[in-house]
Image: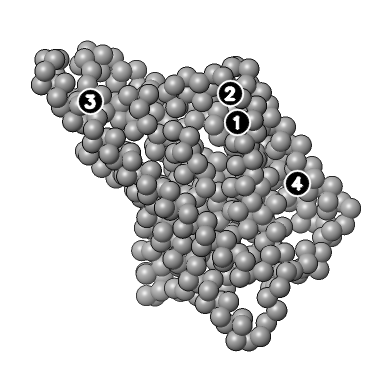
Amino acid sequence: MKYGWKIIVGTIVGFLGSAFGNVGGVGGGGIFVPMLTLIIGFDAKSAIAISKCMITGGATATVFYNLRQRHPTLDLPVIDYDLALLFQPMLMLGISIGVSFNVIFPDWMLTTLLIISFTGISVKSFFKGVDTWKQETLMMKEASKNSLTDGRGGSTYIGNPEDDAHYIKTIDPVKDNTNQSRKKVSVIDNVHWKELGLLFAVWIMILALEIGKNYTTTCSGVYWVINLLQVPIAVGMSSYQAMRLYKGQRIIASKGDQQTHWRVLQLIVFCACGILAGTIAGLLGLGGGFILAPLFLGLGIPPQVASATSILAMAFSASIAVVEYYLLKRFPISYALYFVAVATAAALVGQHLVRKVIAMLGRASVIIFILTLTLCVSAVLLGGVGVANMIKRIENKEYMGFGNLCTYKVKE
């Protein structure tokens, strides 16, 4: 590994990408890949592999940071383990499907899908951020008026669970002190170990199948059996969690409304969204956070919880890709370790600084705007690189049609 101006510039871009990406809950892959190709000079496949390493490093650091954090308004962990258990197995199944389609679909179609997806999600996230900002402003004004009229003193940053903004409410200082003391719990008590164990179980089983698949002949009988075995694992675990939610044995408590009456169709749609997020992520070579984080926000989950839960699910899926790429010797170890260290440090710094900003401003909508900014930058960079590659292939008169999964060979 040679240090020079490229490494310095790449380090700065990677640091900012990881800091913003992990705060927004999307990981930063949309910034890492263009940085590694345009600045550092890696080919596309090596760039994607190192990007997955950076996503895994940043996401893992963020997860460990969030293990001690509490929900912004409720006496709960900031990570919603029940929500993660519903989506994460289907996300991993979708990524497996998307990777296969990535080989089949032509580059121009993937680039078009990328631009459309990122643009649509960015616009929706922006308007969600504006709406949340307005609600926070109204709540601040109401809290200020109440503090002047009821004589109880002080607006406090703990929020109203029934409001979509979830942040500001005027309360009794005595109750506030009780609430703050209740939030100080150990890591052991702050983790839902059963749900986390189930997430690890799914991760281990699918990882074993993905590793085994690399030692089979593509499109052979064993290859398809291993692929299909992922379906009962992922569907079974998500169905188990969906059944618990349907029966009221578990709730998505982070919403604050204690919803216990889940409809079957509603749960099926959520699971389908998990597969869709994973499929698109696998198609574009990214993590699933850029779909999950906005989706969680749309469900009424507070930004801090949406970001933390999305990052947890993405850490599992990205780490599987890292193991596969390592077995395929797709990336140089020295570069990967260096940029993983950069992404890890940036993720921790980003989380710390953003929490300070939120506490100072009293506005968690900052996270939504960071998410929107990350998505917009990713769309411009990835879209630009994709269009440039298409133009080059057209000039060279290369084949730009659909590929064949069974005859595809990795170019060394």
Answer few, some or many: residues within 10 Å of disc 1's Cα (few below 14, many 20 plus, some between 14 and 19). few
* Above or below: residue 175 compared with residue 354: above
Label 2, label 3: how far apart the Cα atoms are: 32 Å
Front in this rendered view, residue 288 or 4: 288
Residue picked out by circle 3:
156
Mark closer to the chain start, 2 or 3: 3
**Residue denoted by label 4:** 209
Quarter occupied by residue 201: top right
Distance CA(mark 3)–CA(mark 4): 50 Å
What residue did someone put label 2 on? 262
Task: Give the left or right position of residue 110, taking residue 351 as reference.
Answer: right
Mark nearer the viewer, 4 or 2: 2
Choose mark 2 or mark 3, whichever is in front. Answer: 2
Q: Secondary structure at mark 4?
A: helix
First along the sequence among labels 1 and 4: 4
Q: Which residue is mark 1?
A: 266
Q: Amino acid at mark 3?
A: Thr
| Residue 190, horizontal then vertical, whole percent | 45, 25
